[in-house]
Amino acid sequence: MWERTLQDLIRGLRANKKDEAKFISKAVDEIRNEIKSDDMELKAGAVLKLTYLDMLGYDMGWASFHVVEVMSAPRVHLKSVGYLAAAQSFDQETDVLMLTTNLLKKDLGSTPADVAVTLNGLTHFVTPDLARDLSPEIIAMLNHSRPNIRKRAILALYKILMKHPEAATHARARLEEKLEDSDPGVVAATVNVLCELARNYPRDYLSLAPQFFHLLTTSSNNWMLIKIIKLFGALSPYEPRLVKKLQPPITELISNSQAISLLYECVHTCIIGGMLRGPNGDSLARLCASKLAAFIQDPDQNLKYIALLAMTKIAPSHPHLVAEYQDTILASVNDQDISIRMRALDLISAMVCQVDRDNLQSIVQQLLSHLVPENSSSMLPSATQSLAQHTASTPRPPLSPSQSPAYRLVLCQRILAMGSQSTYENVANFEWYISVLVDLSHVANVNVGAEIRDQIVDVVGRVKAVRRYAVKLMYQLISDDTMVRNAHEEGSCSEVLWAAAWVCGEYCDELAEPHKLLPYLLQPEVLSVAPEIVAVYIQAATKIFGTWAASLAQRWEEDDLAQVKSVVDQLTSRFSELVSSPHIDVQERAANSLQLFRFIQADLDAHRPTSLTPFSPDSGLDTPEPRFPKSLYLIEPLSTTYELNPVAINAQASVPIPEGLDLDTWIVPPPKEVVADQPPDKKKKGKKGKEKEIGGSKVKGSKKKKKAKVEYGDVLAPVEETPEEVAERARRKAERLAQLRDDPYYIGIDTPKTVQEDIDSIPIVRLEGMPSLAGPSTASPPILKATSQMFSTASFVIDRDGEMPEGAVISKPLSVPVSLQQTPIPGENPAPISTRPSPFPLYEAPGEDAQTSTPEPIKVTRSKKKGTGKKKRTPAAAVADA
């Protein structure tokens, strides 16, 4: 009978692509018949075809026993087929592996060819049981006369040690001997195995450092040198003396080696091994930086990626060396490979953190240039070009790196993070930084408006010298309706309008004519922005009018009355429309402002010209009537009475406790529970002489129960309870309290807390957070009280500590180290504040029972009546049990 060979099976698969499943099903049936044959050649051929089908994804687990049969074939070419199939299909759960122990021992003691085949296959399917049983044979193989067997035995020993670590005590000495083997292949295999073993337990292999150092200085095998250098990188943190010893040979390898892989491993080992520190560390770091810079310029993308990754690790210790290649690094930000761009951004962020403050401006400006669209200044396309762009057959050009939304988002976030790091420690000119935030809101085209808004408000609140320039830019932003029109678009960063309105409203005294900003704040197009922005617009318009009206009152002329009436009428009309807004915040603020302006409007209508002396708002009550409407001073004190300053991180925890206030005592003592005392025991006889209990005592005769009456003067006291009854009552009450605690309709449980709260784990809410903000624009500049077109050259003072409450008790240093500060999120919790889960305060008295609020049973003292043996209740009050 003619049987198919493996070549025939492959040809058949290629010829039956349309009906491959049917062909394979027929081939498997033939293989099932062939594999049962007594002819070992035919059986091996069937196993070989099954191995090929297993590579295609068809299971051959059903033929595991037949694979073991082929492994036991006497001829080496058939045995190799069996071991190949076992390596391909066997796993840790294969049940026939328990039958192979003696077979493997036999093959390991056979001819060199059989030993080589066995060692190759064993490493793929060795189990813990096989590793335990075969470890003596594998260790003995390390002294085999043939180098190729010794090399295979060393590599197989690694798998044995992974499955059976107990064999390491016997194999360690043999492996150390193989480091001095005469065959280079055996030495390389030994170094490879020891390097892998030392990765998990490097301290155990410090004793081999002299031998590895000898190989490092004498070997010319680059692959073995890479392994040795990796091993020294793992050993040097445990032996500091190695750093000084390794610097000369590694420096020589970096200077002279042409192998890029070896060169990179040397640089990487210098970084992670701490070799860049010390007296010779600077020269070695300069050499490593120069080599990595060459890698960054290499066209190989993989090499460029690992170079950027290694350069990021050098930046913390030698930032000045990395800064020398700033242009080379920035060129990678626009690379087509997204992974390279991200690593370049990581490196740039590390450079800004470590290099001088002037470095920030140049880096940020170059990063901003990547956000500007390439065709922003180009003319509109012609009709032919537009038609070609929309033709389906024309392939669309790939997006440039700067056009990717994900990349633009990361780039904007990195710019904001670099500027705000350590409470703006790297910013030297805050006027420049405010302009950068405004420009970023225009070119970002991603959703970073909230972050820009927060930083604008934070900077303006902390740096007083930048407020006047910020008001100028925010005026431009509000007067330019471009952002208002584009507010509905994705990535418009319209949140900066929140910051613009807040800054102009809070610091409008910097404007010469603030009332000219009111039409922009209340124009009908404002309704297209988010409701929270409209609410801030209303608040800012009210503040601006109050400041302008107060300044106008100081230089009042009767001709100003018409102008004020016109502005008030416009504001009243606009607020009347906003009162019907569906958004509650807008509606509430508009309603509040409307009432204020209606009062001002009525006062203006009632005003009559007078020629009295000017009015001072600080004057006494006996001052004569002013010659201007008094309502002009109505709004300004509402927003200018107190200065708005940033709040210190630990301000809340430093609030002093008022004298005489004890936070541990009861504010309102809880009411005591009173239990009615039971009447004294009395026994009454019934008609039939039977006794019946009344109030805890037996009563005779009556079938009906009579309620016990409490006589006047009796003391209210509970009956004594046994310990079992007390425990049962406490258990029932605890169950009831547990049910009430889970009842959503129950307001609260009037019991002391039973669990001691972990006060130290409760975070502190930082009070310096203000609503997020942001804003930029390019419109006609506002007229300030003193105009300034260029950035100020004066030094800026930033309030990093923040304001503390009056009479604060400083328990911690006010200033947080600059390296630990974060903005706007605080970097630490100075002191915990206890919080209560219930909406009502729960009191806790010292010494009170934590299980129940029921008072302890009261002991009643009774006295005996003279001449009788009966007990009589004394009128004396009972004494409570302590």
Image (spheres, rainbow, N blue to C red):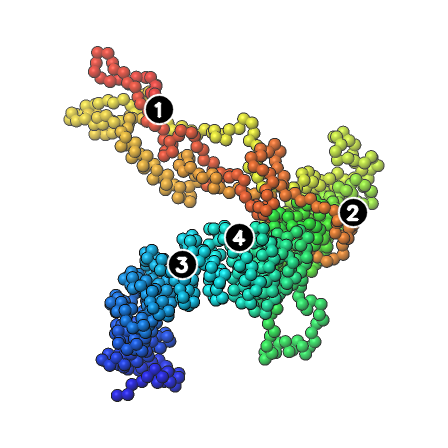
Q: Do tag 3 and tag 4 residues touch (Cβ < 8 Å)?
A: no
Disc 2 is placed on an element classified as loop
Residue 447 seen in the current view: no
Say which of marks 3 and 4 sits in front.
4
Q: Position of residue 491 (x, y in %)?
A: 61, 61
> Which mark is nearer the camera, 2 or 3?
3
Badge 3 amino acid: Leu
| Mark 4 closeness class: few <14, some 14–19, many ≥20 residues within 10 Å | some
Locate residue 623, reporting x and y percent. Answer: 77, 31
Picture coordinates of residue 457 (x, y %)? 65, 48
The residue that label 2 is drawn on is: 785
Give the residue at mark 3.
Answer: 197
For image coordinates 77% across by 49% down, the residue present is 784
The answer to whether 587 is drawn above or below residue 480 in the figure is above
Say left or right for 447 vs 731: right
Which numbered mark, 3 or 1, is in the foreground of this view? 3
For the point 35% across and 63% down, which residue is it? Answer: 157
Q: Earlier in the sequence, mark 2 or mark 3?
A: 3
User: Which residue is identified by label 1?
Assistant: 882
As drawn, the residue found furthest toward the bottom would be 1
Q: CA distance from mark 2 to mark 3?
A: 74 Å
Pick the front one: 9 or 164: 164
Residue denoted by label 4 = 244
Is 523 on the left or on the right of 338, as rendered?
right
Disc 1 from disc 2: Cα separation: 77 Å
Task: Kindly indicate the quadrant of the structure image that contains residue 301.
Answer: bottom right
The image shows residue 124 at horizontal and vertical percentages of 35, 67
Residue type for callout 4: Lys
Q: Residue at x 21, y 25 (%)?
A: 699
